Image (cartoon, rainbow, N blue to C red):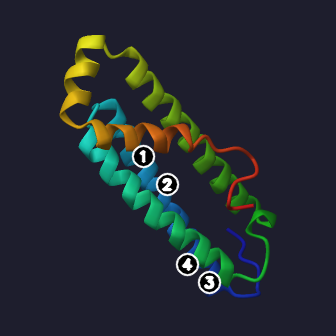
Amino acid sequence: MSVPSDNPTSFNIFIDILEVYENLLHTETQAIAAKNLDEIESILAQKEESMKSVLAAKSEIEFDPLTNINTKDLITRLIELQKRNAESFKRLIDTQSEKEKKSEFEKKPLKNLRIIKAYSNSMFNSSTRLN
């Protein structure tokens, strides 16, 4: 990856944090596939903290990271993973039988409502916080 010369250390930190976020998205994909709501909730909290770190690291670099083709590709991949996870989570909720929904959601109604709300608000578009 070519690193613009302004501040390579800050740029590398930014890339490292983006890669951590990508790993969280992959872990989230697995948790959704396993229908593990507790794990999904934990990952959502980690993603929120990671996004704060991404934004803080981005503010430390003095150029637009999207001008670097590799970084742009990574960010595009992250957005696609997030979209796919949001769609998978929606399918998970939509395809559960009414009995399963009622049983699981009666046990933890507030937690599940927060998770559903997080995914319904997380459909990324091209004008994300990273732009």
Give SS at disc 2. Answer: helix
Give the class, few, some or many, for how many residues have Cα within 10 Å of label 1's Cα (few <14, many ≥20).
some
- Residue drawn at point x = 59 percent, y = 77 percent: 56
Q: Is residue 6 left or right of residue 27?
A: right
| Distance Cα–Cα, label 2 vs label 3 | 18 Å
Q: Which residue is mark 4?
A: 13
Quarter-of-image position of residue 98: top left
- Residue drawn at point x = 55 percent, y = 64 percent: 18
**First in residue order: circle 1 vs circle 3:** 3
Residue 83 image offset from top left, x and y in percent: 58, 38
**First in residue order: circle 4 vs circle 1:** 4
* Residue 99 circle label: none
Q: Is residue 20 visible?
A: no
| Distance Cα–Cα, label 4 vs label 3 | 5 Å
Q: Is there a contact, CB below 8 Å, between mark 4 and mark 3?
A: yes
Q: Is there a contact, CB below 8 Å, between mark 1 and mark 2?
A: yes
| Distance Cα–Cα, label 4 vs label 2 | 14 Å
Question: Taking 15 as reference, is 84 above or below it?
Answer: above
Quarter-of-image position of residue 131: bottom right
* Residue 26 circle label: 1
Q: Which residue is mark 3?
A: 10
Question: Taking 33 as reference, is 115 above or below it?
Answer: below
Q: Is residue 93 visible?
A: yes
Q: Is there a contact, CB below 8 Å, between mark 1 and mark 3?
A: no
Q: Which residue is mark 2?
A: 22
| Distance Cα–Cα, label 4 vs label 1 | 20 Å
Q: Amino acid at mark 2?
A: Glu
